Amino acid sequence: ENTNSIGAIIKEAWRVLKSECMLLVITYGNPQGRIPFFTNLVEGVEQTPWDITIRRVPFSPSALLTRRLRVRLKGQPLRTVTKEVLSEEMAKVQEDLYRFDTMEDRGPEKNTFCFAYCCKKKSNGMAIKVMDKTKPAAPAEKFS
């Protein structure tokens, strides 16, 4: 991952968006690693020109199952999976989805979710409000 490119992309999005417009960024990266990309877009200013709401977004059941099977099969084709293995992994996917709202961030390789950063460009450009909604999702809150 090229962090210079990520920063440049977010900076360019900020430059071209009108005030009050939205940027949606979906990534495996947790808030501690991603929020810095949204700050310091304007030289000499230490705050972010965005209001940011962060949400956890669960993977689909089929994506979770495929991910689990690929690990379990260790490189063998998915068509080689047995009914027993499929049944075991489906039960684990159900458990993961059931525990989604209480799961710890285990890193991109093991998480059953990704993060969505809903970024609203500030009209005055220099206020900061970060609402960390990494617990799953009731409907998004409106705030200014």
Image (spheres, rainbow, N blue to C red):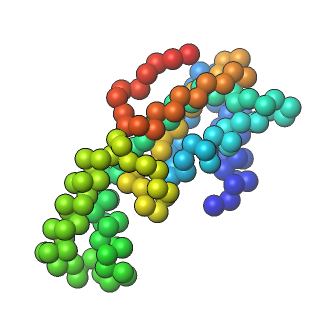
Hey, which quadrant is residue 78 in on the image?
A: bottom left
Residue 24 seen in the figure: no
Task: Name the outermost residue toward the left.
Answer: 83
Q: Is residue 116 left or right of residue 90?
A: right
Residue at 43% across / 49% down in the picture?
104
Residue 52 drawn at (x, y percent) = 57, 30
Residue 26 drawn at (x, y percent) = 50, 45
Q: State whether residue 101 is above or below residue 18.
A: below
The residue lying toward the viewer, choosing from 9 and 118, is 118
Q: Quadrant of the C terminus?
A: top right
Task: Name the outermost residue toward the right.
Answer: 44
Q: Is residue 126 left or right of residue 88?
A: right
Residue at 46% across / 38% down in the picture?
134
Residue 141 drawn at (x, y percent) = 43, 22
Hey, which quadrant is residue 31 in on the image?
A: top right
Residue at 72% across / 47% down in the picture?
8
The residue lying toward the viewer, choosing from 9 and 109, is 109
Residue 108 seen in the figure: yes
Residue 7 drawn at (x, y percent) = 70, 47
Q: How many marks?
A: 0
Q: Is residue 55 left or right of residue 19?
A: left
Q: Quadrant of the N terminus?
A: bottom right
Q: State whether residue 12 is above or below residue 67.
A: above
Q: State whether residue 65 is above or below residue 22.
A: below
The residue lying toward the viewer, choosing from 94 and 28, is 94
Residue at 75% across / 36% down in the picture?
41
Q: Is residue 85 left or right of residue 136?
A: left
